[in-house]
Amino acid sequence: MRQIVLDTETTGLSAEAGDRIIEIGCVELFARKLTGNNKHWYLNPERDSHEDALKVHGISNEFLRDKPKFAAVVDELLEYVDGAEIIIHNAAFDIGFLNKELELLGRPPFTGHVARVIDSLAMAKEMFPGKRNSLDALCDRLEVDNSGRTLHGALLDAELLADVYINMTRGQDALLIDEVDAGVPGAILTRVDLRQFTLPVLLASEQEAAAHEEVLKQLDKASGGKTVWRQLAIAAVA
């Protein structure tokens, strides 16, 4: 599946109130690998950004004056995302703005052009209940280097989110281990695919099972009783 990690920057928080998109950044993944076929646009929103928005993205109104309007890039954007799976952090926000821009041009909604939209924020909330799940927080938790992110930027944020998403969805069945450090001059890199081995199953002891149950109770408490496994357990008993 071809995937596009997408992010936008806007003049404010409400597309319905007239705020517009000022930047779009897209990063392409194919077979979970970065392809380098990325897209990036600055756009003239035909209005000024709110003061609070300027503090977030730092893109001045003057800088955007000579940039193309959304109508000038829409065909290129839709052709680029056509049929792809789209990954967005807090998808409702970006999709809302994209749909409004398309509506102003008399075009169908954005979701009609793509295979589906994955909200990485919703995924993170399920994986890390009760924890902060902003992009910065996830970068810290998953050891993704975000040291260059002093302000929000659509392309940079899409690149960071691509790394975060790959880390969030990495499964053991695809685990590959490097036997040597690829950064060492003259080193020979050998890839070991663990799928060729039959690994023993080690069952938890009673003490380990009890400790695990205590962790589940704490997660359940932190999420206000909304953890999926508790709900399924209750439904099964009922």
Image: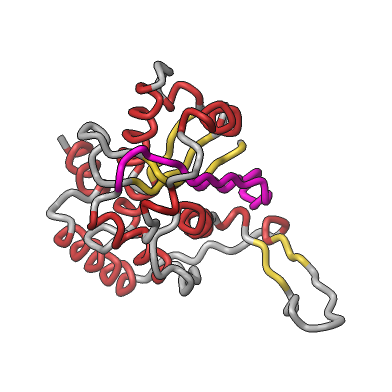
- Where is residue 227? Give x, y as percent: 22, 50
Q: Quadrant of residue 108?
A: top left
Quadrant containing the N terminus in the rendered view: top right
Kindly tell me whether residue 9 is visible in this rendering: yes
The boundaries of the magenta stretch are: 25-48
Q: Residue at x 41, y 21 (%)?
A: 105
Residue 84: % across, % down? 56, 32
Estimate the x, y position of residue 161 in percent, counting from the top left. Answer: 47, 55
Return the residue nearer the eye: 137 or 191. Answer: 137
Residue 168 visible in this rendered orientation of the protein: no
Is residue 218 shown above or below 1?
A: below
Residue occupying the point 28% across, 39% down: 19
- The quarter of the picture where the C terminus appears is top left
What residue do we see at 53% from left, 62% from top? Answer: 201
Taking the magenta stretch, the answer to whether it contains residue 34 is yes
Q: Quadrant of residue 73?
A: top right
